[in-house]
Amino acid sequence: MNERFVAIAALLTAGVAQAGGPPTSNSVAAATETAEQNSLCTGIEPFFWEIGDKTGPLASGSVGVDSTGAPVLASTKMDTASAAKWLYGMYVVQERGSAANLTAEDINFLEMTSGYTNMGNDDSPAGTCPGTDNPDTVDVCLTRDNPANHLPYNYQNPATIGFFDYDAGHFENHASLYTTLGTVPKTNLGSVVSKVFGPGANYIYTEPLLPGAAYMAPSTFALILQKVVSGALAMNGALGIDPICTYASSTCNALNSPIPEPWHYSIAHWIEDDPQVHGDGAFSAPGGQGFYPWIEASKTYYGLLARAAEGPQRQGFQSVQCGRLIRHAWDTGVQQKGKIPGGRVSTDGQADR
């Protein structure tokens, strides 16, 4: 028997035995076939994907290999890029004790309306914190200048206050102003942040850049998502709260969004609710190198598509286009052979953070 279908059968049996399990008897096979055969997925391989619930993984797979012949596995450590924003949001909510305890300042910064928009994104030359700094901390990083305007990363732009403007500076400045993380050396930053997530969730930061330098295996991020779904982490109660518009239009005063669909933004995460692509309301945080974690709107299932793409094109939205098809296949038990109807498929690689 084909090894892949043996694996599918094993996963399905294991999933049904757990609490909840797959939504249909065909969910594992449909998700696997979509990941392996849909052109929006085969076009971005290699990657690893996983779907699970509060009890743990229910289905997963590795698609394609890199130039050395190596696959992406659950244990393959990689840069999560902007997916780290969600981790920072989880940290803040956990430290506050609940979503209800978030302050007005917390919400302002974590929904990217604070005006601290001089840092750029974590994949741009501006949005970096070189290791030559001593001490190598968030606070020191914020004193560096953006070469485009020679203003420091901790500059607050009056013109962007109150408007959604996607920028790493919101999170980095929040950490400095409203947490104790600003003076933590980079070498200790990962252990301090991940401690609030509980055993097994430890990871590192390659720079003192909380919104974009978390480095870990997909299995670690999946464990954190599992804890959110189970309610073990307070982010469960913050998912989707106080949504704000992000796509500039006659009805939305947002300034800058990397997503080419009119999603909303909540506490350090996106809400995939564009009706033109049958948005299912999933909560997510796609990163610029292709790491794409999500939690379904029902908070029943989590998922991720993990890849670390090289090159000039940012890859987050490309991963979204594959990942949400895998998610839809999982929910319906039907293999997805095309793209989601009405979708604005990105071809220029620019709308993907």
Image: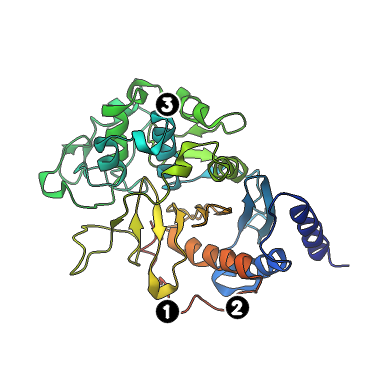
Quadrant of residue 126 within the rendered picture: top left
Say which label, 1 or 3, has the lower sequence index: 3
Name the residue that disc number 1 marks.
342
Name the residue that disc number 2 marks.
337
The secondary structure type at the circle numbered 1 is: loop
Measuring 50% from the left and 55% from the top, which residue is drawn there? Answer: 309
Q: Where's residue 263, x and y in %?
A: 35, 62
Camera sees residue 312: no
- For residue 186, which numbered disc appears in the image? 3
Cβ–Cβ under 8 Å for marks 1 and 3: no
Say which label, 2 or 3, has the lower sequence index: 3
Q: Where's residue 16, x and y in %?
A: 76, 56
Q: In the rendered view, does 10 fall on the left or right side of 212?
A: right
Q: In the rendered view, does 300 fall on the left or right side of 154?
A: right
Q: Where's residue 63, x and y in %?
A: 66, 61
Cβ–Cβ under 8 Å for marks 1 and 2: no
Q: Nearer the viewer, residue 210 or 103?
A: 103
Establish if 122 lies above or below 243: above
Measuring 22% from the left and 58% from the top, which residue is drawn there? Answer: 254
Q: Nearer the viewer, residue 205 or 111?
A: 111
The secondary structure type at the circle numbered 3 is: helix
Q: In the rendered view, does 49 fall on the left or right side of 106?
A: right
Camera sees residue 210: yes
Q: In the rendered view, does 218 fall on the left or right side of 102?
A: right
Tag 3: residue type?
A: Lys
Q: Nearer the viewer, residue 148 or 278?
A: 278
